[in-house]
Image (tube, rainbow, N blue to C red):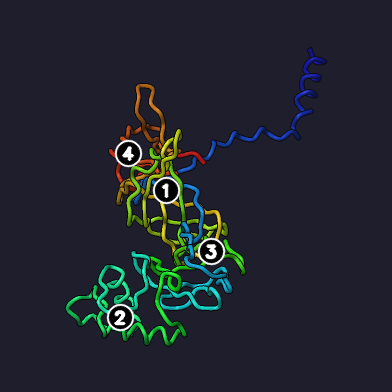
Amino acid sequence: MLALAAAGFGATRAFPGRAAPAPVAKPSLTVATVTRADLADSRMMPGTLGYGAGVTVRGSGAGIVTQLPKVGATVRRGKPLYRVDDQPVVVLFGGTPLFRPLDKPGLTGRDVAELRDNLTIMGYASHRVRDNDVLDNGLLAAVHKWLKDLDLDVLSPARAVVLDGPGRVSALTARLGDPAAGDLFTVTGTGKVVTVPLDASDAGGVRVGAAVSVQLPSGDAVPGVVGSVGTVAEAGETPKVTVTVKVSAAKLDAAAVQVRFTGQVRKQVLTVPVGALVALREGGYAVQKTDGSLLPVKTGMFADGLVEVDLVPEGLEVVTTP
């Protein structure tokens, strides 16, 4: 018995230097606070930044192209745009192409009214007449003064091109020495736009005048406004909707971009992170309070990692995922 006791005592004395096991730490909780925020139902769609769809400028009459504009040149009212047989071809703005020489008093028509509009804006003529669509002596004198400043003798379809407004030469089709009667170059608008092709099912909430955000390749975002919404249908294919977005702050001439379209907006609603939602076995959702209890909630809009909730007080701390 003494030997056993001694052995037992020795065994007991062999462990005094071993450290006691550390207590198990409780897992830390990631906590979020129920706060008010604005939520917006938005989506990002790819688009192309540029100057929009172009219009082909076609020359008329006999002659040889002797000068073409440079790509990027601005198209201005009343100014020469290119030259045929070393004579300038000038620009008028409007919707009626010239179809006859405007050189005889008494001519009437939309082309005459269009000419008067242009010469009035340029300061050569006046609208203070009874009939704006009549080529009277006063308008004819204004035409001659303008043509003299341009070193032209007559205003004819071969010496003027009518466009719908200011533009920018985007591409050349013809070369020097080509016949004047043909496709010469392409003109776009002067403002930058983003063209976004959408399926018809995705375009239901897109409206002209709606504000959007355009994300550039650099990651910067610039504001934009929807300028047009048009449907393009090709045989055998699902109709596509083309949306153009006007932007002014972009420093790039062309780039692939992302456009954020915003739909429904919910102002100052109670929100929690989506990770705070707990799916209930009986259906629906709850949030977990820091004491471990569950509080059922009613959910609304989901956006940007947040979810609209109801039936909870503002300022409540809830458990969420890290």
For marks 1 and 2, the one nearer the N-term is 2
Apparent side of residue 248 relative to residue 208 in the rendered image (left or right): right
C-alpha gap between disc 4 and disc 2 = 59 Å
According to the image, label 2 marks what residue? 120
For marks 2 and 3, the one nearer the N-term is 2
Q: Position of residue 246 (x, y in %)?
A: 41, 60
Q: Is residue 106 above or below residue 244?
A: below
Badges 2 and 3: C-beta atoms under 8 Å apart? no
Which is more foreground, mark 4 or mark 2?
A: 2
Of helix, strand and loop, which one carries label 1? strand
Residue 184, numbered circle: 3
Which is more foreground, mark 3 or mark 1?
A: 3
Residue 300, numbered circle: 4
Residue 242, numbered circle: 1
Quarter where residue 290 is shown: top left
Which is more foreground, mark 1 or mark 2?
A: 2
Of helix, strand and loop, which one carries label 4? strand
For marks 4 and 2, the one nearer the N-term is 2
Residue shown at the point (24%, 75%) measured from the top left: 134
Q: Residues within 10 Å of mark 4 (few under 14, many from 20)?
A: some
Residue shown at the point (52%, 60%) measured from the top left: 183
Q: Is residue 102 above or below residue 209?
A: below
For marks 1 and 4, the one nearer the N-term is 1
